[in-house]
Amino acid sequence: MDRDKLLGLYRQMLVLRHFDEMCLDLKMKDLIMDGFHPYSGEEAVAVGVCTNLRPDDAVISTHRPQGHSIAKGSTPRQIFCEMLGRRGGVSQGIGGPMQWIDTPNNFFCGSIVGSGITIATGIAMAMKREGKGRICVCFFGDGASNTGSFHEGLNLAAIWKLPVIYICENNQYGEAMPVREFVSVYPISKRAASYGLEGVMVDGNDVEEVLAAVEKGVTAARSGDGPVFIEAITYRTRGHYGGDPEYTYRTRDEVEWWRKKCPIARCKARLLEEGVEESVLIALEQEVVRELESDLAWALEQPFPTVEQATDHVMIPLAEGGRLK
């Protein structure tokens, strides 16, 4: 890969990592008033996937959306505001940490496990009818592959050859349960064959491998060859949520083993091999942290939505006193 391109991917992953760690700190200080699910350790998936997309492509995410959203084009300022419930967010702070919409960047997320799969399938059907070569990408976790939406969505997408790419982020745990204890077929990518799809498995901690696999999938989906299923093997190095007693269901040695496979450290090693000076990489990371600290300071100064603004986008008319008619 071109060295400058790899350096760009490295920078994006640094943004996602430091953004995530700052959000975890905000959560532990009780400044994020809803559930926060860390994404640290999985950055190569979001960056490797979204780098292949056009601005008019759509992305559907689930309850770890922060990495996906920023990789798709949302600014850290906007997503800090969404996390903090402030008006500067992409959904004016009303969406919260798991349920925002960034319309200009065609990004949507929701907190119901697996629900995005059928939504993405429907969006892809509309895109196929539209005929502009747009595609939809759907991120979901290993646990979502057990839901009815998974089977319904893949079946219809395969029958109608819809332009959708399903990205299963297998981070080894469905909340506190190891994936091999709740999935009957492993790897999960094998399930794609049940619907006539090729199931592709990639090292989700290798940004170059993810990028290459998704690039191939995007080409197929845009050309009308139908849906693509990619399972990215990765690991969340933080708990399922902020405050999760994670060492009750996994060991410190296991977490440490995966930390050694950190996607950012691996990318950094590749850049050093390519001749990039370490001082350049250190300066780059310092610049990222400075920018994020400035974004967070700005977000913390933004106002909260008012009670009246909470119904700004509610379509059901309310009677006097706020009750349903």
Image: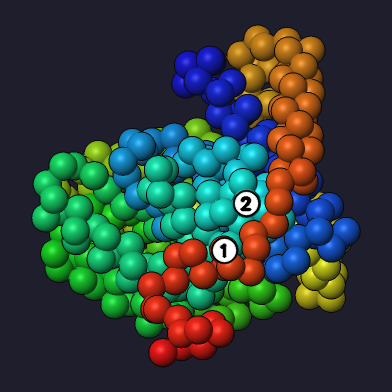
Viewer-side label of 1, 2? 1
- Tell me, for residue 87, which label it has, or none: 2
- In the picture of the structure, the residue carrying the numbered disc 1 is 309
Amino acid carrying mark 2 in the image: Arg
Amino acid carrying mark 1 in the image: Gln
24 displayed left or right of 14: right
Does the CB distance between marks 1 and 2 fall below 8 Å? yes
Q: What x and y, as percent, mark residue 266?
A: 66, 33
Q: Is residue 63 visible?
A: no
The one nearer the camera, 106 or 49, is 106
Q: What element does badge 1 sit on?
A: helix
Q: Sequence order check: which comes first, mark 1 or mark 2?
A: 2
298 displayed left or right of 49: right
In the rendered image of this protein, does residue 313 appear above or below residue 232?
Answer: below
In the rendered image of this protein, does residue 56 appear above or below residue 3?
Answer: below
- Tell me, for residue 42, which label it has, or none: none
Q: What x and y, as percent, mark residue 134?
A: 24, 44
Image colouring: rainbow
The one nearer the camera, 34 or 48, is 34
Residue at 57%, 38% in the rendered image: 75
**On the rendered image, what quadrant is the C terminus found in?**
bottom left
Dot 1, how many residues are within 10 Å of its Cα: few (below 14), some (14-19), or many (20+)? few
Q: What x and y, as percent, mark residue 100?
A: 52, 59
Residue at 51%, 70% in the rendered image: 311
Figure quadrant of residue 152: bottom left
Residue at 40%, 78% in the rendered image: 317
In the rendered image of this protein, does residue 211 appear above or below residue 29?
Answer: above
Q: What element does badge 2 sit on?
A: loop
Q: CA distance from mark 1 to mark 2?
A: 10 Å
Figure quadrant of residue 158: bottom left
Q: Is residue 303 visible?
A: yes
Residue at 44%, 35% in the rendered image: 51
